[in-house]
Image (tube, rainbow, N blue to C red):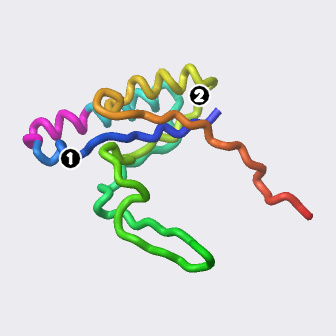
Amino acid sequence: MQYMLLIYGDMEGFPEMSEEQQAAEMKRWYDYSEWLSAKGWMRAGDALQGVEHATSVRLRDGERIVTDGPFAETKETLGGYYLIDTENLDDAIEAASECPGAMYGTIEVRPVLDLPAEAPQG
């Protein structure tokens, strides 16, 4: 079953780290990606640019509303994701608990909805 690991955290402290601290933190993420791959669970994953680069789009009464910034103001923001494929939720929870972001943020484990490849006829 496929799961999205949505990584939420407060990224404000990262720029304040020394170059050595940043490099050590990034190594933890690369090591985690390698661990997921070695387990055969890794399907995809990416880090996202900061919320200051976000654009939110809404449609209200047929009108498109475009605003700078995230959908909601929160301290923890979506910083990235992993798409994994595991046998069950317990394995997905194991993967989430090994994620470096779990130490200072939240990893949301969400099953991917299995939709048919083609739209229903009719």
Amino acid, disc 1: Glu
Mark 2, residue position: 86
Mark 1, residue position: 12
Q: Is residue 99 left or right of residue 116?
A: left
Specify whether residue 94 is painted magenta.
no
Q: Secondary structure at mark 2?
A: loop
- Mark closest to the chain's N terminus, 2 or 1: 1
Q: Nearer the viewer, mark 2 or mark 1?
A: 1
Give the x, y percent position of residue 10.
Answer: 27, 42
Amino acid, disc 2: Thr
Quarter of the rendering occupied by the C terminus = bottom right
Give the x, y percent position of residue 39.
Answer: 49, 25
Give the x, y percent position of residue 102.
Answer: 35, 29
Up-down: is 95 above or below 18? above
Q: Residue furthest right?
A: 122
Up-down: is 71 above or below 107? below
Q: Secondary structure at mark 1?
A: helix
- Crowding around mark 1 (Cα neighbors within 10 Å: few <14, some 14 to 19, many 20+) is few
Q: Which residues are magenta?
A: 17-27
Up-down: is 23 above or below 97? below
For the point 76% across and 53% down, the residue is 117
